[in-house]
Image (cartoon, grey):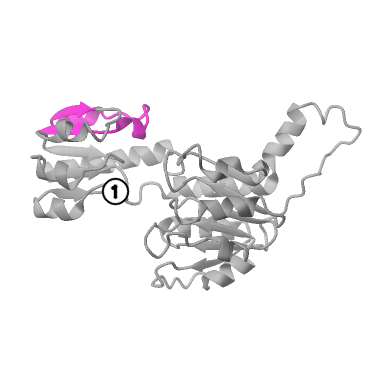
Amino acid sequence: MKIVFLDTKTLGNDISLDKFETLGEVIKYETTDPRETLQRVQDCDVVVTNKVVLSKEVIEKSNFKLICITATGTNNVDLETASKANVEVKNVTDYSTSSVAQLTITLVLELIQKISYYKEYVDSLQWSRSNLFTHIDKPFFELKNKKWGIIGLGNIGKEVAKIASAFGSEVNYYSTSGKNLNTDYNNVSLEELLKTSDVISIHSPLNDATYNLLNKTNLDMLKEDAILVNVGRGGIINESDLSIKLDSAKSLYCGLDVVEKEPIEETNPLLKIKNKDRLILTPHVAWASVEARTTLMNKVFDNIKSFVL
């Protein structure tokens, strides 16, 4: 059996793939250009991809019988063509819940506590030259008794809700599908969540119902000094509208681990905002703790092993 990995660089150099060699011949490519995909997968049995697209043409002109996606999303595979060609497609779920929840909390706490500002205050020797034992020019608040709104109460959303509750926050949520009726937390409308929340975190998938869910119309509903974090998918927040909001007089603080086009384009308006202290951008890393990536690859291994056996 021949197994081809198309983009191992997205998995990190610290995660070993050696055990896959017990299943057959393994060929690993760090990255794959779209022009290279067909030639690399045409004669293999199993394709392992994270973000490399397996199109209708590639599937129809190849002989593989299993596609393993090293992620939850399947939008990079033509599922209809795969089904017609009797190619099995296996993704991986529930491997990064703790990792994503952890970055969510990290972003929220950084934005609340103004850690970067206070670190710079000390590093620049301003504290050393001060005549006061303290410096509190950047006020911060406690999460206790604040309202935390969650958009998308799936596994990750529930994990964040649990942590937020431990801080003493009141958790409310908005179901983007309208089907999630969790009785542990208050289910509210999107408008109520935006108007009343001190902190909002997004954990929903990107689909027709969530694309541009937050835009100039409802971003203006947010409370003064609200914190908005998106670790779901880029495209849920309109980035042009958000950039304008971040530079408006009514302050908003935002942490984003995802943007609509990744890697982020140099022309993205979020890179050009004036109020840099109001925005933290991280390069889609929430999913990627060592533990999460290890679990991910163990599940991919099991997917291939079960297919072979």
Say which residue appears at 45% left-offset and 50% top-offset: 234
Say which residue appears at 41% left-offset and 58% top-offset: 155
In the image: residue 172, left or right of residue 51: right
**Quadrant occupied by the C terminus:** top left
x, y percent for residue 1: 9, 33
In the image: residue 186, left or right of residue 40: right
Say above or below: 178 vs 109: below
Say which residue appears at 63% left-offset and 63% top-offset: 222
Q: Nearer the viewer, residue 32 or 90?
A: 32
Image-quadrant location for residue 210: bottom left
- For the record, the magenta segment spans 1-28
x, y percent for residue 125: 80, 26
Say which residue appears at 67% left-offset and 37% top-offset: 116
x, y percent for residue 278: 65, 46
Residue that lies at the very extreme toward the right in this rendered image: 131
Determine if the magenta segment contains residue 24.
yes
Say above or below: 22 vs 207: above
